[in-house]
Amino acid sequence: MHWLQALDTKLFLFGNRSLVNPFFDWLMPVLSGSNGVKNYFLGLAIAVGLALLIFGNRRLRLCVVFTLFIVATNDGLICNPIKQAVHRARPFVTVPEARLFGVVGKGYVAPEINIDGINMAADKGSHNSMPSAHAANFFAATMTLFLFYRRSLWFMLPLALSVSFSRIYNGVHYPSDVLAGALIGAGYAAAAAVAIELVWQFFGKKFFPRAFAKAPSLVPNLNLGKS
């Protein structure tokens, strides 16, 4: 397995060091939501979501609800338990050449030992590298939107790939962390959508016939309700 780690590190350094340029030094932290940008993204997402819930049609509303549910549960049910189990150090901790948010040599997070002997730096995410939650969440959203609107892939896939690459460029994830996150997020979204649709096909037809008649499929593009 040593060669896999060596390859992972080489690919990380290529994205983190070899592709450095002033534009990426500005853009990549923005895509990762650093320096408070995340709050603006969340505010915009909430505003758009509320507008779609109020003014959108049935498909738009279902899409919003599905996306919120899948992204909200992805971290707690999937990503965080895996992170705690794997406990992999982030590359800026273990790779001396790593650039952390554009600064060379500022990668290592030194221990902050409190009066009880507890390392407070552990809470800063020094050992929460595998998988990338950013990649998982964006690919989960990409898959969910794709299941409702095929053409959304033209926008969401480049966005998810860009955000995922920003995690490597910013020095906080290895490429394998990002790949694992993307597969987990997309897989979880697809599995959750199929499970919810199957439950609706079984229970909706039986216990909620009027609602089922209006919406025979919650996720039409799955085509599970068609023979």
Image (spheres, grey):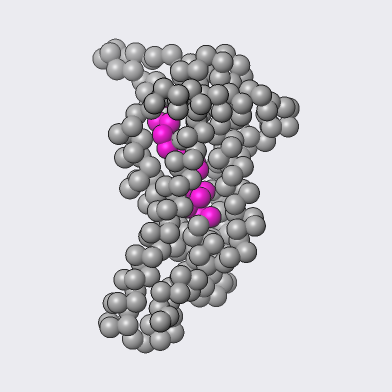
Residue drawn at (33%, 32%) of the image: 86
Nearest the eye: 58 or 114:
58
When asked about the image quadrant of residue 122, the answer is: top left
In this rendering, the answer to whether 40 lies above or below 117 is below
Q: How many marks?
A: 0
> What quarter of the picture does the N terminus occupy?
top left
Q: In the image, residue 183 lies at what x, y percent? A: 45, 47
Tell me if 138 is positioned left or right of 129 in this view: right
Magenta stretch bounds = 126-142
Closest to the observer, 37 or 126: 126
Rendered-image quadrant of the C terminus: bottom left
**Picture coordinates of residue 152, whole percent (x, y):** 61, 61
Quadrant of res 35: top right
The image shows residue 204, relative to residue 142, as above or below, that is below
In the image, residue 137 lies in the stretch drawn in magenta: yes
User: Residue 9 appears at what percent x and percent y?
Assistant: 51, 24
* Residue furthest right as drawn: 22
Q: Is residue 1 left or right of residue 141?
A: left
| Residue sitting nearer the eye, 129 or 179 | 179
Instruction: Give the residue at x 59% y 52%.
Output: 157
Q: Is residue 164 above or below residue 152?
A: above
**Residue shown at 46% from the left, 19% from the top:** 93
Q: Is residue 165 visible?
A: yes
Is residue 50 within the magenta segment?
Answer: no
